[in-house]
Amino acid sequence: MPSADAADATPAAAAPPRAAISHVIFDMDGLLLDTEGFYTAVQEKILARYGMVFDWSVKAKMMGKTTAESTRILFEECGLTGLLTPEEFLEERETMLKELLPTSVAMPGVLRLIHHLHTNGIPLAVATGTHKHHFALKTQNHQEIFSLMHHIVTGDDPDVKAGKPSPDIFLAAMRRFECDVGPSNCLVFEDAPLGVAAAKTAGMHVLMVPDARLDVSHHKEADQVLSSLLDFNPSAWGLPVFKD
């Protein structure tokens, strides 16, 4: 009969996985690539000209929205109507973004996670509200990441009838995997509240990696919240463990 000491030394059983995940879908801006700061800087610069401040309460409402919808929100929240037109705003913003977007860098932990999942045969996809022309600018120096994706769905894809928080983009991404996969077997990585809401509406599991400046009240819908992809534990989701 084992001694009490021996029994105490027995390691506790590992916690069961949160879900049986077989496929992974990633948002891009602020999750895979550090691009959100560019949009913030550009909007701050334009608003400063009118003595206005672009703060995170406004940004939180805009994150994950289509360009048209986020512009509408910005004009409403900041009272820009009559100072310049949405078309003038977008033209000026586009000029600045064209210089900034190609300089984007990968977020911490991205390369390690993408290579690990791909090496272990986990099908990967990107579902981003970014349109194709901006996607090309942002990713031109990051083919090491995006070449490993099974497919990529952008915000101007014909199957995306409505932007986040509509589930369209995540459902489109799920349907393009080669096998018959259901929403409950998909794990979505997101940084934006609207993206989290879209993935949950699609019936998927969501791991959120929010900007530290985002109010914690926006975290509640996510199944798990991490401060960085470096903190991700694949085995908690039934995925292969890191070897290093």
Image (cartoon, rainbow, N blue to C red):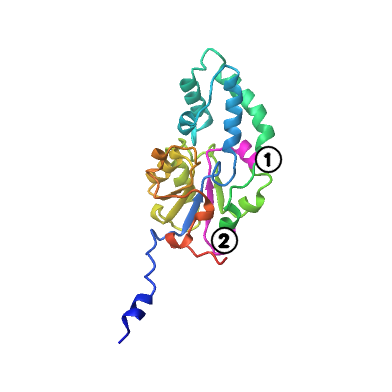
Which residue ends up furthest to the front in the rendered image?
5
Question: Is 221 situated left or right of 92 in this image?
Answer: left
Asked if residue 209 is positioned above or below residue 129 in the image, the reply reads below
Measuring from the top left, give residue 81's x and y in whole percent: 51, 15
Measuring from the top left, give residue 137's x and y in whole percent: 66, 39
Residue of label 1: 103
Measuring from the top left, give residue 230's x and y in whole percent: 54, 54
Which of these two is toward me, 1 or 131? 1
Quadrant holding the N terminus:
bottom left
Measuring from the top left, give residue 75's x and y in whole percent: 50, 21
Residue of label 2: 116
* Boundaries of the magenta span: 115-138
Question: Is 98 situated left or right of 216 in this image?
Answer: right
Q: Residues within 10 Å of mark 1 (few under 14, many from 20)?
A: some
Which residue ends up furthest to the top in the rendered image?
82
Q: Which mark is residue 119?
A: none
Q: Earlier in the sequence, mark 1 or mark 2?
A: 1
